[in-house]
Image: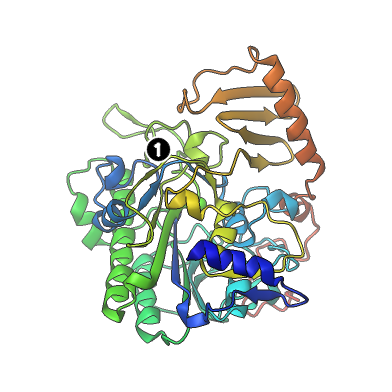
Amino acid sequence: MRVALRRAAALLGCGAALVCTMTGVGAADRPNIVYILADDLGWKDVGFHGGAIRTPNLDRLAQNGARLERFYTEPYSTSARAALLTGRYPMRYGLQTLSILPWSEYGLPTGERLLPQVLKEAGYRTAMLGKWQLGHYKKDYWPTQRGFDSFYGSFNGDLDCLRKTNQAREPDWHRNERQVKEEGYCTTLIGKEAARVIEKHDLTKPLFLYLSFNAPQAPLRATKEYLDLYKDVRDERRRTYAAMVSALDDAIGMVMAALERKGIAADTLIVFHSDNGGALPNKYPTGDGDVQKEFSDNGPYRDGKGSLYEGSLRVVALASWPGKIPAGVVSERIHVTDMYPTLLGIAGIRPEQTKPLDGVDQWDTITGAKLSPRKEVLLAMEDFRGALMVENWKLIVYSRLPVRYELYNVQDDPSEEDNHADREPQRMQEMLVRFNEFAWEMAPSLYLEDIHKPRKYPTPIYWGDNPARP
Ligand SMILES: [Ca+2]
């Protein structure tokens, strides 16, 4: 049926309309989409990957859905969100470097057409909850200006989940375009609000709910209720991190229960993944002569958030839609940019794009019907480093002098211990040619431009009532 509908749409053509939809697929027939991001979650920090942290709700989703075991994202929060919402590599529009900070004056360029804009034009109700981190300095960057009917959460990352303050120690909790003061733990607030959005949802429209949780990103903050679950964990940072993950899992449970109560669980696709791998900030003494390496656990994968190794880029991911996605493990290559065309595909929407997508429709991969059409993934392209994957080979380039190359076969060597760079001259040559083609397409980094800007005020400029803001 789906294939036939796609074919019908292909024959229709889109003309001048920004969005053309398939005949016979009314807005009410389109699935609801609940897209959930965790922030800096370690690959092994879920029950279904054998971790010690209790995540029964995620485990249930994983058991009933497809575990996407080769799902690649971006090294940082901003680039991951940008790639998801544009379907395009962040280096195309200047978001390839690090993440947007409270005092950043740039944002995701408004010329990029975002997933919620397209879904909204096709009749979806679009709600965003949680961490935005795609720009806040100008109102034009805010989620409510980028396709979301409503927004509830923080503009920035690194949120103190108890106080709901950002890295600049400013309050950062918003409802739509207003700053709000609320008591409560951010993860639980997001879960409750998501349940409310689902409960109040007008069933004549499909729903796109984008839940971008702040958990379990540092600073590590948890409530007593969740800390008490991990009394047996000696290390305080690991205990708090585990508590944050369980709070996240509970909030996801609230969402699942709300979908059931509303009677729309069968019509709803749930996607879950981490934005990037678990953070491994440093090695630190635990006080009893031991050295604790990290509070998150990326399992077999090397390194963590921010690096170009698998521990940073290959994340916990699943997709669940009972009756539509068979339960099982999908070991095929999927990149976060693929989700844009995939979601539009299942919603029966063929937008007219003014800019080419890097993502490809992976629905048949997720359902297990076909192998991934993805042979190549540009994992990162930054000013001083980059990574390109071609089939099972990953090339990493550090371009600061002296230039360094690494080449791994991530199929045979998922922990990236055996660097083949000196042993595969032919492959290196071919991959470097392709890598350089991408390098020529890179837009100037907005982060690097922004940090060199002379500022009127040396302190962070906030979006509140600061007269300096345009
Ligand atoms: Ca992150």
Q: Does residue 136 appear anywhere in the picture?
A: no
> Is 406 situated left or right of 285 in this image?
right
Front one among 458 and 395 = 395
Q: Which residue lies furthest to the top in this view?
A: 423
Residue 165 % position (x, y): 48, 66
Front one among 228 and 80 = 80
Residue 29 % position (x, y): 46, 78
Q: How many labels, in total?
A: 1
> Is 160 situated left or right of 167 in this image?
left
* Rendered view: 165 above or below 397: below
Residue 375 % position (x, y): 61, 38
> Is 68 situated left or right of 78 in this image?
left
Residue 171 % position (x, y): 51, 71
* Number of residues whose C-alpha sits closer than 10 Å to that of mark 1, classed few (under 14), some (14–19) or many (20 or more): many
Tag 1's secondary structure? loop
| Residue at 34 percent of width and 60 percent of height | 248
Q: What residue type is labelled 1?
A: Asn
| Residue at 58 percent of width and 71 percent of height | 116
Check disc 1 and report the residue beneath it.
298
The quadrant the C terminus occupies is: bottom right
Q: Does residue 91 appear anywhere in the picture?
A: yes
* Rendered view: 239 above or below 2: above
* Rendered view: 6 above or below 441: below
